[in-house]
Amino acid sequence: MSDADPRYVYSADGLSLTIKKRIEGMLKSTGADLNNVLCYVISDLGDLDGREMTFGDALCGHTYGGFGTIMSLVPGHLAYYCPETPGKHYFLFRE
């Protein structure tokens, strides 16, 4: 993912325990866990674009693939990126 600042890009497949705990801590402060945190979705997939839904539901809706999607979980601090083509998914995380 070359368009984002590499200091804040983390592969969803291989999150270090430290980053995972920091993300969980941020979400805990909102009263949610990763699957049920409410997120805003920006997507090429019309059924998802512009909607607020839980992160778990947004991921399930994106599993058909072929559409670029960004899910904003904690505005300004945590987002999730799914590329248009099959490939790595990323967390964008800044405290």
Image (spheres, helix red, strand yellow):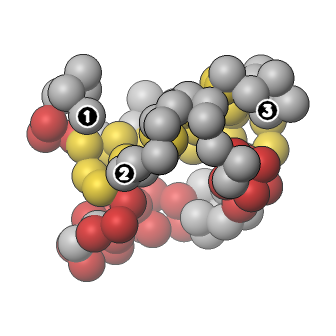
Q: Is residue 94 left or right of residue 66?
A: left
User: Residue 15 appears in which quarter of the rendering?
Assistant: bottom left
Q: What amino acid is found at the position of numbered circle 3 in the picture?
A: Leu
Q: Where the N terminus falls, by quadrant?
A: top left
Q: What amino acid is found at the position of numbered circle 1 in the picture?
A: Met
Residue drawn at 71 percent across, 48 percent down: 64
Question: For the view shown, which residue lies furthest in the left direction?
Answer: 7
Residue linked to disc 2: 88
Residue 88 pos. (x, y %): 37, 51
Q: Secondary structure at mark 3?
A: loop
Q: Earlier in the sequence, mark 3 or mark 2?
A: 3
Q: What amino acid is found at the position of numbered circle 2 in the picture?
A: Lys
Q: Earlier in the sequence, mark 1 or mark 2?
A: 1
Q: Are marks 1 and 2 in contact (CB under 8 Å)?
A: yes
Q: 18 or 82, which lies in front?
A: 82
Residue linked to disc 3: 48
Residue drawn at 47 percent across, 46 percent down: 86
Cα gap from disc 3 to disc 2, whole angstroms? 20 Å
Q: 73 or 4, which lies in front?
A: 4
Q: Secondary structure at mark 1?
A: loop
Residue 43 pos. (x, y %): 66, 25
Q: 90 or 23, which lies in front?
A: 90
Count neighbours of disc 2 (C-alpha within 10 A) and say few if under 14, some if 14 to 19, many if 20 or more: few
Residue linked to disc 1: 1
Cα gap from disc 1 to disc 2, whole angstroms? 9 Å
